[in-house]
Image (cartoon, rainbow, N blue to C red):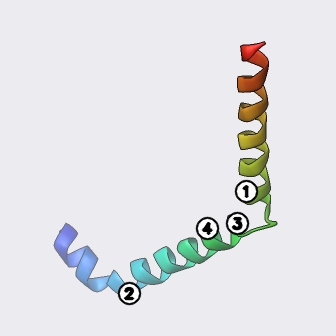
């Protein structure tokens, strides 16, 4: 059953996966929201590390 489903709907799954991959690439691109949030997280962690030393 699963094999039949994968063979019949393979192109649909590939198309869907490629679309999600493209959206993920765009979201993490420089200047995008995820990129900015990750950058902010890194800066916060650095600041916390410096503050814990004092």
- Label 2 CA crowd tier, 10 Å (few <14, some 14–19, many 20+): few
Separation (CA) of disc 1 from disc 4 = 9 Å
Instruction: Write the residue at 76% across / 24% down.
Output: 50
* Residue named by callout 4: 24
Quarter occupied by residue 1: bottom left
Query: Disc 2 or 3, which lies upstream in sequence?
Result: 2
Question: Mark 3 or 1 closer to N-term?
Answer: 3
- The correct choice, above or below, for 31 with respect to 38 in the image is below
Residue furthest to the front in view is 54
Q: Residue at x 72, y 15 (%)?
A: 53
Q: Is residue 21 left or right of residue 50?
A: left
Say if mark 2 contacts mark 4, CB within 8 Å: no
- For image coordinates 79% across by 30% down, the residue present is 47
Provide the residue designation for mark 1. Answer: 34
Residue 22: image x %, image y %?
59, 77
Front-lying residue, 43 or 36: 43
3D distance between C-alphas at marks 3 and 1: 6 Å
Point out the tag, 2 or 1, that comes first from the N-terminus. Answer: 2
Q: Secondary structure at mark 1?
A: helix
């Amino acid at each position: 059953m699963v094999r039949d489903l994968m063979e019949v709907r393979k192109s649909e799954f590939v198309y869907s996966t490629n679309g999600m991959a493209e959206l993920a690439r765009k979201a993490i691109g420089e200047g995008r929201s995820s990129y900015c949030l990750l950058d902010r997280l890194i800066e916060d962690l650095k600041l916390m590390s410096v503050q814990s030393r004092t």
